[in-house]
Amino acid sequence: MHIEEYVTISDVLLGCTRTIETIHGERTVDIPQGSPTNSVLVIEGWGIPNINGAHRGDHYLHLKVHI
């Protein structure tokens, strides 16, 4: 699953913590200091379940710097 998260310049320069919505509920994510725009954070195991139900996929968070 892929989502976009809009962050401010100060958020990416200093780093921050955000709460995002996944298909399995809310999840707190740390955005690392110095993250470039269009970078992708991978949240393992918080995506769509595999078709055979063995495990869940990953959730991809695309960072967009909002000026």
Image (spheres, rainbow, N blue to C red):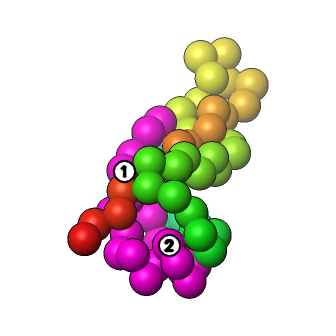
Relative to 33, 1 lies left or right: left
Dot 1, how many residues are within 10 Å of its Cα: few (below 14), some (14-19), or many (20+)? few
Task: Count every numbered label the image shows and give the total.
Answer: 2
Who's the residue at 51% across and 58% down the image?
A: 36
Question: Residue 30: in sight, yes or no?
Answer: no
Residue 37 circle label: none
Considering every residue shown, the one lying at the far right of the view is: 54
In which quarter of the view is residue 7 placed?
bottom left
The mark lying in front, picked from 1 and 2, is 2
Q: Residue at x 52, y 49 (%)?
A: 39
Q: Amino acid at mark 2?
A: Val
Asked if residue 11 lies left or right of residue 50, the reply is: left
Badge number at residue 4: 1
Q: Position of residue 35 (x, y in %)?
A: 56, 63
Q: Which residues are magenta?
A: 1-21
Q: Position of residue 26 (x, y in %)?
A: 48, 65
Relative depth, front residue between 4 and 26: 4
* Kind of residue sitting beneath label 1: Glu
- Tell me the number on the disc at residue 12: 2
Q: CA distance from mark 1 to mark 2?
A: 14 Å
53 w.r.t. 58: above or below: above
- 17 is higher (above) or lower (below) than 1: below
- Crowdedness of circle 2 by 10 Å Cα count: few (<14), some, many (20+)? some
Q: Earlier in the sequence, mark 1 or mark 2?
A: 1
Residue 19: x and y in percent read 47, 72
